[in-house]
Amino acid sequence: MTPIHWKLVLDCTDPHAQAVFWAAALGYEEEDHSAFIARLLDTGAAPAEATQTVSGRLAWRDLAAVRHPDDPRDAKSDAGLGRRILFQRVPEEKTVKNRLHLDLHPGPDARDAEVARLETLGASVQRRVAEQGGTWVVMTDPEGNEFCVQ
């Protein structure tokens, strides 16, 4: 079987703010879809109301994405072809605990500094866990999505 390409998709209320946070948190790059969007608008393949200007560039209104800087990308759309997170606007707020979350692994000697750095980006510490199997910090991103720092 050929491995299946995948991306992680997070529902959110502000995809562009989430992309800014997660790009900074992970050291990823925000994807710039402006040239691709402009081509679609010029040919009538996308409506102008599906777009907005973000940080001085044309962007999808309801979508934003980040990608690993070392992975390949599509030159026409700037979409990542490897490790990638897509943020998708949904109308409802988050109401329950995530069933899927990211674990960040800066290393045990760097964990406290990483937690502090993530707090400056807008993350919040929910609890510190110390169990026989290990220690980690449960945090939430600016929209309340849980993730762990190992």
Image (cartoon, grey):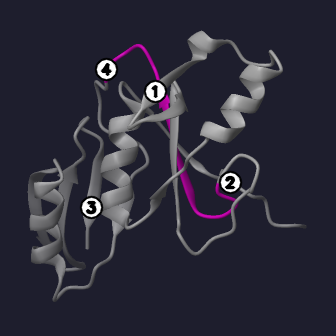
Q: Which residue is mark 1?
A: 53
Q: Nearer the viewer, mark 1 or mark 4?
A: 1
Residue 145: percent from left, percent from top: 30, 41
Tell me the kind of residue under disc 1.
Answer: Thr
Whether residue 131 sits left or right of residue 100 in the image: it is: left
| Magenta span includes 120 | no
Q: From mark 4 to mark 3, how far is it between C-alphas?
A: 21 Å
Q: Which residue is mark 3?
A: 148
* Magenta stretch in the rendered image: 80-93
Q: Which residue is mark 2?
A: 6
Question: In front: 43, or 64?
Answer: 43
* Rendered image: mark on residue 93: 4
Q: Earlier in the sequence, mark 1 or mark 4?
A: 1
Q: From mark 3 to mark 1, how far is it between C-alphas?
A: 32 Å
Question: In front: 42, or 63?
Answer: 42
On the question of residue 46 being in view, the answer is yes
Q: Residue at x 74, y 56 (%)?
A: 74
Tell me the kind of residue under disc 2.
Answer: Trp
**Dot 3 alpha-carbon crowd within 10 angstroms: few under 14, some 14 to 19, many 20 or more:** many
